[in-house]
């Protein structure tokens, strides 16, 4: 077992529980899951696939809130301990760069990253069909919506937390307008967060059964001594519909279009009542992590059954050694795809 280093800040107040005695799980669930249940605020029936960050000694998040009209919207939430959340009653109001109102018709599956001293959000937005919206805030009170990243159809946009070789990097998953029955993870580069190009395929679906149908980037990659740690979701089709599990990969630090290792087996799959039963049964959908570079502790926030928000824990040594020792790559994963 090698000692793995997470690159980043200390986070002494990270939510944490030790792995239960006798457990060999690579990722173990918070014992009080789910942390957000049905009808959490007046306007929303369900809050689930959501993204959090440390903020001013406490925690902040952008939450996917599905209203009773069926439309998902984004709300800010705050927490002292990362587990008990106070979600704002009103959805985020967006302005464009000229100060005009620019609210999306729907917005879901946010990812949140601190980058260059600001907080950027990528979400799935409507733009004649689903694709990636991008916005920025410095204070979580004023929100500026930037240019949409891609034309439809695209989902699961995840920005890297720093530039690589002078360029912003974004993972995404080209899709269709519905419940896409295919999908690989791609990476695109930009000098200004507006014009994107130099697209490469990073990882293909079909590697093993649980990720046979499609895959999508989950949380913002964590920089580690062994490469970029990426948590992602993998989907397989059963006779009862899709099942969403969680896997992990290590991407090359200088060229993240190259996969160094990826998990042959899922590291978390729907098992608990709140994962196998809900609005959409059989979904575990990671959108963010908190981590403590000093101890290597990682808290994973994942949506469960499109109904709940749940937390699971792992640590750098356990997870990264597991990925390296239980990897299975497909042709196209290892090399930059042209
Ligand atoms: C995907 C996204 C996610 C959702 C998942 C399972 O296509 O829409 O928001 O969690 O389906 O329903």
Image (cartoon, helix red, strand yellow):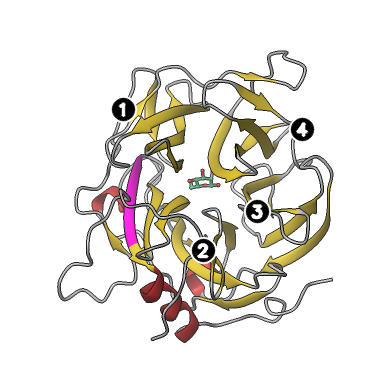
Q: Quadrant of the C terminus?
A: bottom right
Q: Residue at x 50, y 58 (%)?
A: 8
Residue that numbered label 4 is attached to: 147
In the displayed structure image, the side of residue 283 where residue 157 appears, left or right: right
Q: Secondary structure at mark 2?
A: loop
* Pointers 4 and 1 in contact (C-beta within 8 Å): no
Q: Quadrant of the N terminus?
A: bottom left
Residue 89's disc number: none
Q: Main secondary structure of the magenta part?
A: strand
Q: Tally the marks.
A: 4
Residue that numbered label 1 is attached to: 40
Which one is earlier in the sequence, the residue at label 2 or at label 1? 2
Residue 309 in magenta stretch? yes
Q: Residue at x 39, y 75 (%)?
A: 317
Residue that numbered label 2 is attached to: 7
Residue 13 in the image: above or below residue 19: above
Q: Secondary structure at mark 1?
A: loop
Q: Alpha-carbon distance for marks 3 and 1?
A: 34 Å
Q: Toward the viewer: 208 or 310?
A: 310
Which one is earlier in the sequence, the residue at label 4 or at label 1? 1
Q: Toward the viewer: 305 or 161?
A: 161
What x and y, as percent, mark residue 47? 39, 34
Residue that numbered label 3 is attached to: 162
Q: Is mark 3 within 8 Å of ligand 1?
A: no
Residue 96 in the image: above or below residue 312: above
């Amino acid at each position: 077992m090698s000692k793995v280093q997470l690159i980043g800040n200390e986070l002494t107040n990270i939510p944490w529980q030790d792995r239960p005695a006798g457990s060999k799980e690579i990722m173990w669930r918070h014992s009080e899951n789910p942390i957000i249940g049905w009808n959490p605020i007046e306007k929303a029936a369900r809050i689930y696939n959501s993204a959090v960050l440390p903020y001013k000694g406490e925690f902040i998040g952008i939450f996917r809130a599905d209203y009773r009209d069926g439309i998902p919207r984004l709300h800010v939430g705050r927490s002292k301990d990362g587990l008990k959340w106070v979600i704002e009653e009103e959805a985020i109001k967006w302005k464009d760069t000229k100060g005009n109102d620019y609210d999306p018709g729907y917005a879901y599956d946010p990812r949140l990253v601190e980058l260059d001293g600001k907080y950027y959000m990528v979400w799935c937005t409507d733009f004649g069909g689903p694709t990636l919206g991008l916005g920025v805030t410095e204070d979580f009170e004023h929100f500026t919506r930037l240019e949409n990243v891609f034309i439809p159809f695209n989902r699961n946009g995840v920005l890297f937390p720093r530039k690589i070789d002078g360029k912003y990097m974004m993972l995404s998953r080209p899709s269709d307008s519905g419940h896409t029955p295919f999908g690989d993870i791609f990476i695109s580069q930009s000098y200004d967060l507006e014009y994107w190009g130099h697209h490469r395929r990073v990882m293909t679906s079909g590697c093993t059964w649980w990720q046979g149908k499609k895959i999508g980037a989950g949380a913002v990659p964590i920089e580690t001594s062994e490469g970029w740690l990426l948590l992602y979701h993998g989907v397989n089709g059963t006779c009862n519909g899709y099942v969403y599990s969680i896997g992990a990969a290590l991407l090359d630090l200088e060229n993240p279009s190259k996969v160094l290792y990826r998990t042959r087996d899922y590291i978390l799959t729907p098992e608990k009542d709140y994962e196998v039963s809900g609005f959409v049964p059989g979904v575990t959908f990671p959108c963010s992590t908190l981590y403590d570079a000093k101890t290597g502790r990682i808290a994973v926030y994942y949506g469960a059954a499109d109904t709940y928000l749940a937390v699971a824990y792992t640590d750098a040594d356990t997870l990264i050694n597991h990925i390296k020792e239980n990897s299975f790559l497909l042709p196209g994963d290892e090399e930059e795809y042209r």
